[in-house]
Amino acid sequence: MPQSGQNSRRTVLGTLGASAAVPFLPSVLWAKGQTGPDASFAKIAADWLDQSMRLSPVSATWTGDHRFDHLLNDYTPAGRAASLSFAKSILTRLNALAPSTLSRANQVDRAMLVNALESQIWTTETLEDWAWNPLLWQDAAGSALYTLMARDFAPLPQRLNNVTARLKLLPGFLANARENLVPARVPTPHAVTYSAQNQGLKSIITDMIEPAKGALKGAELDALNAAIAGFLNAIDIHQSWIDQTLVPAAKADFRAGAARFDKQLTYTLLSPLSRQEIRRRAEQAVRDVRADMYAVSVKALSGRADAPPLPAAPTPAEQQKAIRAALDLAAADRPARDKLVEVSTEATEIARKFVVEKDLITLPNGPVRIILMPEFQRGFSVAYCDSPGPLEKHLDTFYAVSPIPDDWTEEQAISFTREYNRRGIQDIAVHEAMPGHYVQIFHANSYPSILRAVLSSGSFVEGWAVYAETVMVEEGFMADDPLYRLTQLKVLLRTITNAIIDQGIHVDGWSEAQVMTFLTETAFQEEREAAGKWRRAQLSVTQLSTYFVGFAEHMETRAAAKAKQGAAFRLKAYHDGILGFGSPPVRYARALLLDEAIG
């Protein structure tokens, strides 16, 4: 789907690595000037940041802390125990600090850190994802190399030498995955996706490392070549285990169930909204958006000889037929299957020019780069925004687009490009780049709390991107094209139905047939999009709820700001203001902006 998926931000809640005791300078500098309880909190935050980077070297590389670029995450029992012990020690220190004694900014950061630690402890002790979710291992293995090669944060020879160091460790890492994963506990969708993604690790070698290795010579080049050979062999060994042992035995239920879903929803959203209230709001929103889609469809179809009946008060069947007819017009304007990056690049520039013309928000100085999604990350989402870490905000931001698989039939490719037609890609460019994720994370990285950047809220980030789609239309983007407005509403409907199928699948036991019917008929999705969403929903729990919940909270916050400021309200000032607090849960950004209680 167009939203950013699991890769828009990376967390540092990992497990144990090893390194010399070097202070994490950015966090130490951030702590300067604070006194009393705030100084105590700053010390706790600095200690957590420093040690978390040690515990998750791969995430540290992305964040911009390069002390551990030669190491890998440790997901072994010893590593998990060390990480768990550290998390509990930090939580104990935090619980000794009364929130009311802290500054408002630190109250927010404390709440976010407590939530993250409690989530980590629950995930390790109760969820035990290291034993049944192979995609945790896959992301760590691929990102270990990708984060070193994707951005020019250091001279190429230095980065390649760290690639060599990690390549030497990766065969052992894959062996640890085989030792720790329990095939009978792995759900089938996870195993099948893992089988497809594992071979994608080779593409990092062929596409990113091989073309660059000429920067090394002599013994360093020999060491890299030897490490590459060892890693490629390890991938093949691991693939055999995946296909011959893991996939045949992976029969566990992917559904979370109500208890786990509700617990995980609390940690994911850090919102007062319950599962039941989210469902009630989402179902009402489906009815409202479909009514808006019908009204726009009437405009788009008006005067066409082949238009279906367009009564003022349509029956459900008449509403369905009219919306589908109008969407078919938009779907007919499709990109070529091999031109998705080019069309996405053009769409991003169109959106950027409109944002500048309307002066909607302060924009970054540099461009966002549209790239083909790395092969090892394909199979989860259609697109995502990959921003630099908070310590390296000057580096490139990538808007990654997944290509259509070569083995798809022409019929499947047409289904995909009907969904991601030119207007759909235009809306995705707004979501991922202008003024969506790219712009929002630029603002977030300017906030001085590195802790808040590392713990960024998925519902704030995803909700903002959906809000960005809406505000562009409100301000007149593509106003002369009703089919664009219809497409944007269809994507909004997708956002809403994400939240419904998230709990429908994991709590209510919806079948694949139920999901496909709901998505293709109620939400008007093409078969390929609906099939992809079914796959994604099996692989994730509660993440699909972040879009709708965050969007609703952003809309409510803007309404509250308008009500409070009255005639003084200015949209650009509001946008810059709400994004100026980083990426906390929306409830906290609202409290800070409107001087409300931090609860």
Image: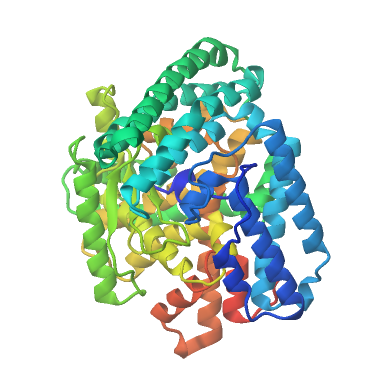
Q: How many marks?
A: 0
Q: Please say if 326 is above or below 106.
A: above
Q: Please say if 252 is above or below 136.
A: above
**Where residue 98 sits: x, y (%)?**
81, 71
Q: Residue furthest right?
A: 96
Between 112 and 508, the residue placed more toward the observer is 112
Between 153 and 308, the residue placed more toward the observer is 153
Task: Note whether residue 198 is visible.
Answer: yes
Between 493 and 591, the residue placed more toward the observer is 591
Q: Quadrant of residue 507?
A: top right
Q: Relative to 381, is 476 on the left or the right? A: left
**Where residue 344 sits: x, y (%)?**
24, 49
Give the residue displayed 40% in from the left and 29% down from the top: 201
**Where residue 557 sits: x, y (%)?**
55, 71
Q: Quadrant of residue 47?
A: bottom right
Q: Relative to 100, is 508 on the left or the right? A: left
Q: Please say if 368 is above or below 418.
A: below
Q: Relative to 566, is 37 on the left or the right? A: right
Q: Residue furthest front?
A: 218
| Screen quadrant of the N terminus | top left
Q: Quadrant of residue 413?
A: top left
Give the residue displayed 73% in from the left and 50% down from the top: 87
Indicate how the structure is coloured in the image: rainbow
**Where residue 39 sits: x, y (%)?**
71, 75
Give the residue displayed 80% in from the left and 69% down from the top: 97
